[in-house]
Image (cartoon, helix red, strand yellow):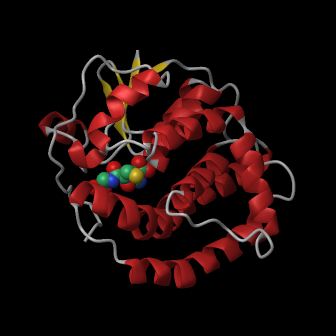
């Protein structure tokens, strides 16, 4: 049985779970917040990041590496278009989302406002958050508005770019920010289409539910809402920062 370490609240974990759901692949989840990972987690994930994909002796890190493996192992239905130029464009959008959108939406957004106070008990820097929303996010939205398809999805099939980017928006909703549909109508219409896809809708339902309880209680709730859990967890009670953690 395939095992995924990481809570569906993480957009990177959500990318992997959504792809597995889309392709009808069964999996178990250890829905931890990465900061609560124990020493076994450090061995499985040297950067102490989620997701981790485990299938027997195979351990994979990084959502894009995992997404590629999933696509090559279970090609149907495809999460990438067939045409090489379109595939490259979709991969670029995935990378842009994972790195640049992630910086503004996750680290300077969701992590700053929600992870910092709830996990590390540090006051959120509200001014820095407002500055991020005012200065970093509009250029991202303008770029998305210039490339997002008028109809359907990136590269013509609902797949890895749509899932990566749409997952980032969900975490910003959790900070109470939402994009202005009058200023960025194409992006908002595409986002609504992506969120209506059953695979992403299910993964979003899981993350919305899990966000309502503190990290240490998430395993219990995850079982109640229908996630198939790994028999063991790599979670410990006290949080710690990893080598890549960007929370003050
Ligand atoms: N490039 C990585 C990014 C993964 C990532 O940043 N995950 C976050 C959770 S949203 C994490 O584990 N953060 C813990 C940390 O960096 O300390 C991927 O695509 O998997």
The relative height of residue 123 versus residue 63 in the rendered view (above or below) is below
**For this rendering, which residue is in front, 6 or 244?**
6
Query: Quadrant location of residue 88?
Result: bottom right
Residue drawn at (48%, 70%), measured in percent from left and top?
A: 104
Residue drawn at (41%, 14%), measured in percent from left and top?
A: 1
On the rendered structure, is 239 left or right of 110? left
Query: Quadrant location of residue 184?
Result: bottom right
On the rendered structure, is 241 left or right of 2? left
Q: Position of residue 125 (x, y in %)?
A: 34, 77
Quadrant in which the C terminus appears = bottom left
Residue drawn at (40%, 45%), measured in percent from left and top?
A: 62
Outermost residue, right direction? Answer: 151
**For this rendering, which residue is in front, 99 or 193?**
193
Q: Position of residue 231 (x, y in %)?
A: 29, 16
The relative height of residue 91 versus residue 214 in the rendered view (above or below) is below
On the rendered structure, is 7 left or right of 49? right
Residue 28 in view, yes or no: no
Outermost residue, front direction? Answer: 212
Q: Position of residue 206 (x, y in %)?
A: 52, 35
The relative height of residue 34 versus residue 41 in the rendered view (above or below) is below
Residue 204 in view, yes or no: yes
Residue drawn at (37%, 67%), measured in percent from left and top?
A: 112
């Amino acid at each position: 049985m395939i095992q995924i370490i990481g809570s569906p609240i993480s957009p990177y974990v959500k990318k992997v779970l959504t792809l597995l759901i889309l392709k009808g692949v069964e999996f178990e989840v250890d829905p931890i917040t990465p900061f609560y990972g124990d020493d076994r987690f450090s061995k499985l994930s040297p950067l102490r990041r989620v997701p981790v994909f485990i299938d027997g002796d195979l351990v994979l890190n990084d959502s894009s590496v995992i997404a590629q493996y999933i696509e090559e192992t279970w090609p149907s239905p495809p999460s990438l278009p067939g045409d090489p130029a379109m595939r490259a464009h979709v991969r670029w959008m995935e990378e842009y989302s994972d790195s640049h959108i992630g910086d503004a939406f996750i680290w300077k957004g969701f992590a700053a406002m929600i992870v910092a106070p709830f996990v590390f008990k540090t006051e959120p820097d509200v001014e820095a958050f407002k500055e991020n929303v005012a200065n970093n996010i509009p250029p991202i939205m303008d770029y998305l508005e210039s490339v997002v398809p008028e109809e359907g999805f990136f590269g013509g099939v609902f797949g890895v770019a749509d899932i990566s980017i749409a997952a980032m928006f969900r975490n910003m909703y959790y900070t109470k920010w939402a994009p202005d549909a009058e200023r960025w109508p194409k992006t908002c219409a595409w986002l609504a289409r992506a969120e209506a896809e059953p695979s992403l809708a299910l993964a979003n339902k899981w993350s919305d539910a899990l966000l309502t309880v503190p990290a240490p209680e998430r395993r219990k709730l995850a079982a109640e809402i229908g996630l198939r859990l790994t028999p063991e967890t790599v979670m410990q009670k006290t949080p710690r920062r990893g080598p890549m953690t960007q929370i003050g």
